[in-house]
Amino acid sequence: MGRKKKWKDMSAGKRRTTLLAAGVQLALQGAALADLKKRTPAQVNGPKALWVAASFINFAGPILYFLCGRKN
């Protein structure tokens, strides 16, 4: 593996991409957590606590919640 780059060593484009990805992750997680908060346990597939924990898995957790975790 290569040496881990520090923020100051990254190009401006890579910094922007990193910030954009972080923003998308936080928005997805925030939306998933807000949705979980307003739903009753009967409106969620599986334990709500499990979906809260899963929302902390980058991108995949919140996306899986929206695809599989909610009952319509």
Image (cartoon, helix red, strand yellow):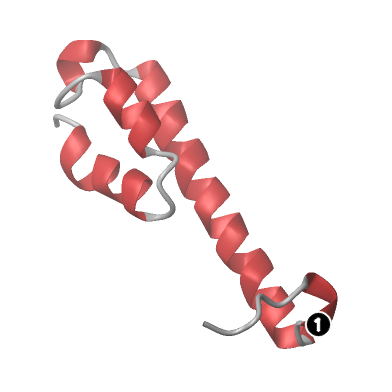
Measured along the vertical axis of the image, is residue 13 above or below residue 56? below
Q: What residue do we see at 16% from left, 23% from top?
A: 46
On screen, residue 72 versus residue 28, left or right, reads left
Label 1, secondary structure: give it.
helix
Q: What residue do we see at 70% from left, 75% from top?
A: 16
Which residue type does callout 1 highlight?
Answer: Asp
On screen, residue 21 versus residue 71, left or right, reads right
Q: Residue 65: image x %, image y %?
A: 27, 40
Q: Residue 55: image x %, image y %?
A: 39, 39
Measured along the vertical axis of the image, is residue 46 above or below residue 18? above
Measured along the vertical axis of the image, is residue 22 above or below residue 40? below
Q: Residue 43: image x %, image y %?
A: 19, 20
Q: How many marks?
A: 1
Residue 18: quarter of image: bottom right
Q: What residue do we see at 30% from left, 30% from top?
A: 51
Measured along the vertical axis of the image, is residue 37 above or below residue 22? above
In the rendered image, the residue lying farthest to the right is 8
Residue 9: quarter of image: bottom right
* Front in this rendered view, residue 70 or 11: 11
Residue 21: quarter of image: bottom right
From the image, which quarter does the C terminus lie in?
A: top left
State the residue position of label 1. Answer: 9
Q: What residue do we see at 85% from left, 76% from top?
A: 8
On screen, residue 22 versus residue 5, left or right, reads left
Number of other residues with Cα within 10 Å of mark 1, as a class: few under 14, some 14 to 19, many 20 or more = few
Q: Residue 12: image x %, image y %?
A: 78, 84
